[in-house]
Amino acid sequence: MKAHKIIFILALSLVFSSGFAQKGKIRQATKEYDNLAYLKTSEILLEVAEKGYTSVDLLQKLANSFYFNNQMEEAAKWYGELMAKNENIDPEYYFRYAQALKSVEKYEESDTWMKKFAASDRSDLRGRAFSSTVDYLAMIDEASRELVVKNLEINSEVSDFGTSQYQDQLIFASSRGNGMKYKWNEQPYLDLFSADKQEDGSYGNVEQLDSDINSKFHESTVAFTPDDQVMYFTRNNYFEKKYRSSEDGTNRLKLFKATLNEDGEWDDIESVHFNSDQYSVAHPTINVKGTKLYFASDMEGTLGMSDIFEVDINDDGSLGDPVNLGPNLNTEGQETFPFINSEGDLYISSNGFNGLGGLDVFVIRDFENKRELKQPMALENIGKPINSPKDDFAYYENLGTKEGFFTSNRDGGKGDDDIYSFIVPDCEQTVEGVVKDQETQEPIVGAKVTILDAETNEQVNQQIVGADGAYKFELLECEKEYLIRIEADTYATTEERFTTPKKQQKLEIQTLLEKDEVALEPCTDLAKILDIPIIYFDFDKFNIRRDAEVELQKVLAVLNKYPTMTIDVRSHTDCRGPASYNERLSENRAQSTRKYLINNGIAANRLTAKGYGESRLVNDCGCEPTNDSNCSEAEHQLNRRSEFIITGINGEKCPEN
């Protein structure tokens, strides 16, 4: 039983042409096809096609038979034959062909047909998702983790899938029962089973749930309220011994609710109020607060084959009205098997977004909080080894016990669909970077890098960097605030606060240090050495501005610290106004700056000053018409400045002075 078979049984309205000799077998195949007995259909259609009798209609039905039975290698072959006819077909077949190719790991060829599919309808969310992340394989590799997945001992030679935990039991669906067979795959109808957790953590002692839950038709996928008193489960449209079908004759899926009675048995089974004979409702999951139920459906308003919906669970246990979760996670494809974990992360299975093939598992992290706050959401493919070229679905995890489960029909399984387990890893982050000089961008050898807990200020780890200036800290917790402190001789210590994300990933932090101790030498600009901002003047003025006074206090402090230092104050203007005027203006500014320093205690013989007018512009904002017209006021102001050139210190003189 493949994932998308049990999800939604669709009536496919494809018309066969009977204009050739094999029409007797074609009629029989069409009848089986309409009854959704795909195994028989593919055998008959394959026999006809292999004799060389093909048409667009026949190839569509043949390829679809393999596609919906998840025999992707055969589906890819016959979709390829269909494409080779080069006739006008529904673009949906481009998508199916691309999916089939992906399932046999022909990713480049798959991308070619996805591009054609995306071009055929630019509004289709599947095509848009593909086009927006053309490097999706690299992104999936980056998201992949080193997990060990194990095929559960309780798997059988038939279909086993869709797990949930109830106390110390694993609840799942299986075709291992002895009931009547489902003609789609010649296996017994699905029933719900339980397996007990053993002392070594494995599961065994498989038993069917009681007969009030299991019927002679399909049951699958359950969810329990946090108090373990109510169970929601999926069943064919069969209730109180009545079997109902939609107007097109399809028996749909419904959600049912059961309550635990005093004897520990599931009782009072009832159909949820938004079930319908005309569409399917399936695969429930309930949040940790017991306030939301999520499920899959193709009810009115669905974007594609099936969408994810949510519904409120009221205080009295009743359910509100379903709400489609929208195009953030629903496409024209198939979104199904939702699971909400205890932290509010929403997992789904989908074939509408970029993946490795078939259904892949995706997650929106912190979904419930982001939805409540109306914040942007990002859907992530959770990568390998949970996802594969085959169908991977029905993700479930218990963050308390660190147990995780999912279902897959990947190669090497015991049966049709198998349940796999894994240990949910602790989320650990790696933080790395290189300590560099802010001005030269050279590594700072011997810098000390310390990671501290931002809440307690306790040291978590510490490293001394080598010749490459690189540091790397591993095993940091996710979703935790830290401080990174970097210290080095002759540099100002810097400290930065950061929070590790919820998703495990490598973080890079830019760590640039400013010089704290600088060797002062003649002929250099004091402003540049000590990173003192430019001293600005207002247009056509030479008075000391308040912001300039703050900076001149820094110059004053340096002169007081080094009493042998002498400096030359150099003032400059922009190009606007006559050159002779600018020379006088800049001279006044230089003398104004010198006077400020003298008035604040610096000996006059330590200071010289000169105005250079517009003769030393720092940019191309000269006042020729071709230049001046392109310069902003801010660009002109860069030329209205003062500089502080060290002319002498400790007996050494600048030669140019």
Image (cartoon, helix red, strand yellow):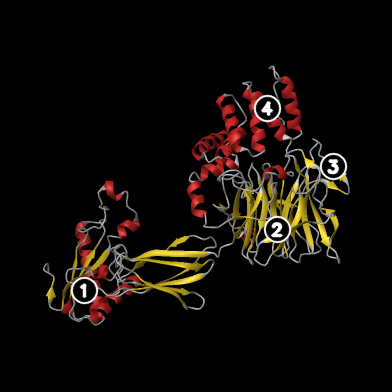
User: Disc 3 vs disc 1: Cβ atoms closer than 8 Å?
Assistant: no
Q: Residue furthest left?
A: 655
Q: Position of residue 2 (x, y in %)?
A: 67, 44
Q: Amino acid at mark 2?
A: Ser
Q: Kindly report which numbered mark, 2 or 1, lies closer to the viewer in this rendering.
A: 2
Q: Above or below — where is 469 with respect to 419? A: below
Residue closest to the eye, 269 or 421: 421
Q: Earlier in the sequence, mark 2 or mark 1?
A: 2
User: Mark number for residue 244?
Assistant: 3
Q: Amino acid at mark 4?
A: Leu
Measure the C-alpha gap from mark 3 to mark 2.
28 Å
Residue closest to the eye, 547 or 145: 145
User: Mark number for residue 641?
Assistant: none
Which residue is tagged 2?
164
Relative side of 509 to 177, left or right:
left
Q: Amino acid at mark 1?
A: Leu
Residue 57 is at least partly visible in this image: no
User: Disc 4 vs disc 2: Cβ atoms closer than 8 Å?
Assistant: no
Relative side of 12 to 128, left or right:
right
Q: Kindly report which numbered mark, 4 or 1, lies closer to the viewer in this rendering.
A: 4
Which quadrant holds residue 86? top right
Q: Earlier in the sequence, mark 3 or mark 4?
A: 4
Which quadrant holds residue 585? bottom left
Q: Kindly report which numbered mark, 3 or 1, lies closer to the viewer in this rendering.
A: 3
Which residue is tagged 4?
45
Residue located at (52% from left, 61% from top): 504
The mark tally for this picture is: 4
Which residue is tagged 1?
520
Asked which secondary structure carries label 2, the reply is strand
Local crowd at mark 3 within 10 Å, few (<14), some, or many (≥20)? some
